[in-house]
Each structure stands twice: as structure tokens, then as C-alpha cells.
Amino acid sequence: MQASALNMIIEIRHYTLKPGRREEFIDFFERENRAALRDAGMLVFGPLRDLENPDKVHWMRAFPTLEARETLKEGFYNGPVWNERIEHQVMPMIAHYEAEVAETTGGFEGFGGRPEL
């Protein structure tokens, strides 16, 4: 299903990190990865510390459509920033990851209590 003009595609990512690596991952994400993802055209929210698992982190990214999601991801993961700067630093910290893809509803509100357009 394609998102309507007012809806967004949200990817909710869950990372289980190797024991003791969470703070290192968060530091790297906040210092390097988040800006790289944003520079590639993605909206990024996070990272978030899991309160029940000390080795788990969550974060989200948003796209205007499913097609844009594929295009932006392909460009990022096949590009030099990921391949030369990010991948070799971040992947050794991750034990497992998964992502869920969801579409916002017509009444979706951001954290400010306003509809996201």
C-alpha cells in the first residue's frame, strides 16, 4: 500500500547490541550516524534506551512514501558514507536487529500535539 500525501512511512528499528556496547553505540549514533542518515534525506528520531534490556536500543526513521524509503535506503547503504565511515564501526556492536514498517494514520500527531504534514 502506498502512503497518501499526508501520511508518512515510519520504520521502527530495534537493535540488540553485544553485551556492554550500548553506550558506545549510542555515542556513535548521536555523533556520526544520525547526521549521516539525515544528510541522506531521512527523518530520524532516537536513539532510545530500552528500560528492560540493558543491551537494547530503539530508533525510528521516517519517509514520505514506500518508494522514497527504498530509494533513500539504497542510496545510503550503497554509498561511500555507509561503506567507508559507518558500517565498519557500527556493525561489530550489533548482535541482532529488526525493523517494523508502519504507515501513519490521517490523524497522526507529532509529539507537539499537532498533525504532522
Image (cartoon, helix red, strand yellow):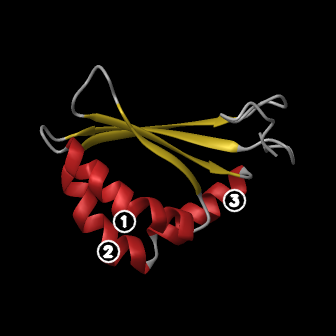
Q: Amino acid at mark 1?
A: Glu
Few, some or many C-alpha atoms within 10 Å of disc 3 (few <14, some 14-19, many ≥20)? some
Q: Is residue 56 above or below residue 2?
A: above
61 vs 111, left or right, is left
Q: Which residue is mark 1?
A: 32
Q: Residue 97: x, y in percent?
A: 34, 40
Amino acid residing under circle 2: Arg
Compared across the picture, whether 96 is left or right of 41 comes to: left
Nearest the eye: 114 or 7: 114
CA separation in Å, label 2 and label 1: 9 Å
Kindly identify which residue carries mark 3. 68
Residue 94 visible here: no
Image coords of residue 28 (percent x, y):
29, 58
Depth check: give the residue in front, 107 or 78: 107
Mark 1 neighbour class, 10 Å CA radius: few under 14, some 14 to 19, many 20 or more: few
Q: Cβ–Cβ below 8 Å for labels 2 and 1? A: yes
The residue lying at 87 percent from left, 48 percent from top is 5
Pointer 2 residue: 85
Q: Label 1's element?
A: helix
Question: Which image quadrant: the N terminus?
Answer: top right
Coordinates of residue 4 in the picture (x, y in percent): 85, 43
Q: CA gap, disc 2 to disc 3?
A: 23 Å
Mark 2 or mark 3, earlier in chain: 3
Q: Are marks 3 and 1 in contact (CB under 8 Å)?
A: no
